[in-house]
């Protein structure tokens, strides 16, 4: 028992097992194998390393956005002239990455709390159509139960006179907004690589900013944008979007390769129409444009009043998109290791062709696999012969009978090595 354990331990420590390899001379299988290996190699080099840059680690940025609008607008409505500055047409005024620039409006002045008729078009024929205490979803206040004969509309408790927004000014009242300018200041930090950059890169100094205006080819790094150019680059017509409002996205793209000098890491600006497809011409579509309301309250003769404004504007969304790369030995080895593993596909495919598709598949099966007959092994143990010597006798016997080469491709002449032949 002790000798068997020591022999098993010795076999485990001092013996080496290697898989059996069969060299198959077959042109079709060889061509299939090389084509698959060539495809795998092209995938590893072309896709993994060149296109996907599998030899680099990646990081995304933590960013902040600061914006500032500049420009002055002018309107003249019913003989009333007014100049609009930044504090009047930008909402909110804090310089966030998301804000609205007013381009059109409907003004309702001198509203105060009281009783007044609803707008024309919300018809009633008698007081029974105006149930007291009820609200209509599209109404302006609480119904008092009275149908006003002069307008044939329900009387409501609301801010009077009620707003009339049926007619939207055309052309837009603030067409001068096309010449407003937007300044974008963006800072990004890549934590893994410890790199911080701003869109005010090398060469973009105070002197340059004072005279530059963004242009995709002539001034691609200028951080000052004309609102009309933003709308045009996003695919909209300014007058169309200014009348009813809409939304535009400005994408600041930081795609950087830190294997090169950091100064080559520069932003790219892209513009996208987010809401209000200029190709849509169906006037019946619902919820067109973008608008909101706000009010300014004041006291007049101790009576609280307000000026209500329905604002139509362009909503600007500034989005930072980032991806930085740098060489790293770990993803490099990972990509190489996975590529080497994929080479095994060629072996699997060729084995399937050999063992199941070719006419001589039985021959290749016998060459690839060795089968052990347990009964033969038992007979050799009874005769007291070493297994290899017994198999040699069996092979010689088959050769004498003339069956070795014709019936058994895995014969002594083709594949069996014995201790007897070594002696």
Image (spheres, helix red, strand yellow):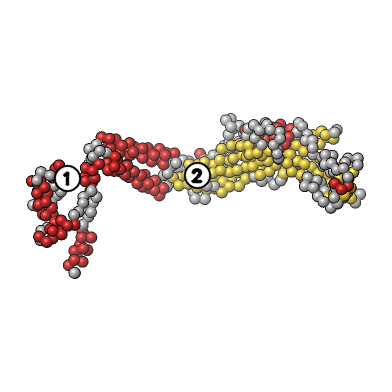
Farthest residue to the bottom: give it: 2
Give me the residue at 37% from left, 46% from top. 338
Task: Measuring from the top left, give residue 123's x and y in whole percent.
Answer: 84, 41
Give me the residue at 35% from left, 44% from top. 342
- Mark 2, residues whose alpha carbon is within 10 Å: few (<14), some, or many (≥20)? many
Q: Is residue 402 above or below residue 241?
A: below
Residue 329 in view: no
Determine whether, in the image, residue 263 is placed left or right of residue 169. left
Q: On residue 49, which mark appears?
A: none
> Going from the N terminus, do you reach mark 1 or mark 2 first?
2
Residue 10 in view: yes
Please tell me whether mark 1 sits on a helix, a strand or a loop.
Answer: loop
Of 115 and 154, which appears nearest the observer? 154
Which mark is in front, 1 or 2? 1
Of 121 and 271, which appears nearest the observer? 121
CA distance separating discs 1 and 2 = 62 Å
Task: Measuring from the top left, give residue 17's x and y in whole percent.
Answer: 23, 54
Q: Tell me the residue that label 1 is attached to.
A: 408
Determine whether, in the image, residue 190 is placed left or right of residue 385. right
Quarter of the rendering occupied by the N terminus: bottom left
Please tell me whether mark 2 sits on a helix, a strand or a loop.
Answer: strand
Give me the residue at 33% from left, 39% from top. 37
* Figure disc tally: 2
Determine whether, in the image, residue 138 is placed left or right of residue 267. right
Farthest residue to the top: give it: 218
Determine whether, in the image, residue 21 is placed left or right of residue 96. left
Task: Measuring from the top left, give residue 308's x and y in whole percent.
Answer: 81, 44
Task: Measuring from the top left, give residue 44's x and y in whole percent.
Answer: 38, 41
Give me the residue at 64% from left, 31% from top. 279
In the rendered structure, are the residues bearing label 1 and label 2 in contact, judged by CB atoms less than 8 Å apart? no
Q: Tell me the residue that label 2 is attached to.
A: 324
């Amino acid at each position: 028992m002790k000798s068997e354990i020591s022999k098993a331990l010795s076999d485990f420590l001092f013996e080496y097992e290697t898989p059996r390899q069969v060299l198959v001379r077959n042109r079709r299988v060889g061509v299939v194998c090389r084509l698959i290996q060539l495809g795998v190699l092209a995938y590893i080099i072309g896709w993994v390393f060149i296109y996907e840059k599998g030899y680099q680690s990646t990081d995304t940025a933590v960013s902040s956005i600061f914006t500032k609008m500049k420009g002055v607008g002018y309107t003249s409505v019913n003989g009333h002239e007014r100049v609009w500055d930044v504090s009047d047409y930008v909402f909110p005024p804090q310089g966030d990455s998301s804000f609205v620039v007013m381009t059109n409006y409907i003004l309702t002045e001198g509203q105060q709390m009281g009783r007044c008729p609803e707008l024309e078009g919300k018809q009633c024929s008698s007081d029974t159509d105006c149930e007291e205490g009820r609200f209509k979803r599209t109404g302006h206040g609480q119904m008092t139960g009275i149908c006003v004969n002069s307008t044939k509309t329900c009387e409501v408790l609301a801010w009077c006179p009620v707003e009339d927004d049926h007619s939207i000014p055309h052309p837009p009242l603030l067409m001068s907004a096309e010449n407003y300018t937007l300044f974008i200041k963006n800072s990004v930090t890549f934590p893994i690589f410890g790199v911080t950059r701003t869109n005010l890169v090398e060469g973009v100094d105070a002197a340059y900013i004072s005279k530059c205006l963004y242009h995709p080819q002539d001034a691609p790094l200028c951080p000052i944008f004309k609102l009309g150019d933003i709308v045009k680059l996003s695919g909209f017509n300014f007058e169309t979007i200014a009348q009813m409002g809409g939304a535009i996205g400005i994408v600041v793209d930081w795609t950087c390769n830190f294997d090169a000098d950091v100064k080559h890491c520069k932003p790219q600006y892209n513009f996208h129409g987010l809401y209000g497809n200029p190709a849509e011409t169906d006037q019946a579509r619902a919820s067109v444009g973008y608008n909101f309301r706000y009010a300014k309250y004041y006291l007049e003769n101790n009576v609280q009043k307000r000026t209500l404004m329905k604002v139509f504007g362009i909503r600007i969304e500034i989005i930072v998109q980032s991806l930085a790369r740098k060489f790293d030995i770990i993803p490099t080895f990972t990509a190489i290791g996975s590529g080497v593993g994929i080479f095994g596909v060629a072996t699997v495919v060729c084995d399937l062709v050999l063992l199941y598709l070719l006419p001589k598949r039985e021959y290749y099966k016998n060459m690839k696999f060795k089968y052990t007959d347990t009964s033969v092994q038992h007979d050799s143990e009874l005769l007291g012969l070493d297994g290899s010597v017994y198999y040699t006798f069996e092979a010689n016997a088959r050769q004498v009978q003339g069956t070795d080469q014709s019936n058994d491709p895995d014969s002594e002449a083709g594949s069996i090595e014995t201790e007897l032949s070594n002696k």
